[in-house]
Amino acid sequence: MLKVVGGKRDIPSGSFIALQPNGLYCRFSSVVECLTHINMTAEDYMNNFTGTVNDAEEAEDILNNYVRSFSAVKGLTTTRNMAPAEWKRTMTHVTLPKNSIFVYPKVL
């Protein structure tokens, strides 16, 4: 949950996994304030596709207990490291059906 403190957003440190509108997963980084991975399947994440989990058990725990809604990504993304046109293109790709031939590559 976002809250306003002293006029600034309370941005979580590190990163989190969110469920995209198309049912796949993405990774948001608060360091760059934008998405770093999109269109991951659960298997991609379980196989440490992002390079950020220690083992499959940790990845499974994150997917089962700590996945955030995509609205959190929308609320925290800035244009410091992702241009507005890139954000718009990414938003198109995270809403395309999982089996679309136009699904954007997983790593941004």
Image (cartoon, grey):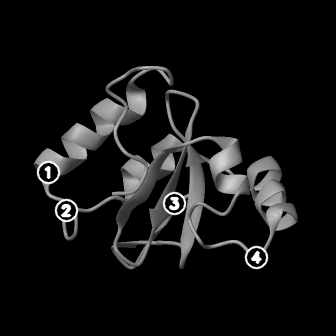
Q: Which residue is mark 3?
A: 2
Number of residues whose C-alpha sits closer than 10 Å to that of mark 3, classed few (under 14), some (14–19) or many (20 or more): few
Q: CA distance from mark 3 to mark 4?
A: 28 Å
Q: Position of residue 47 (x, y in %)?
A: 70, 57
Residue at the spot of label 4: 54
Q: Answer whether labels 1 and 2 touch (C-beta < 8 Å).
A: yes
Q: Earlier in the sequence, mark 3 or mark 1?
A: 3
Marks 1, 4: nearer the viewer = 4
Q: Secondary structure at mark 2?
A: loop
Q: Earlier in the sequence, mark 2 or mark 3?
A: 3
**Residue shown at the point (29%, 42%) measured from the top left:** 90
Question: Would you say 77 lies left or right of 44 here?
Answer: left
Relative to 96, residue 82 above or below: below
Looking at the picture, which amino acid does disc 4 mark?
Answer: Asn
The residue to which callout 1 is attached is 84
Regarding mark 3 in the picture, which secondary structure is present there? loop
Mark nearest the camera among 3 and 1 is 1
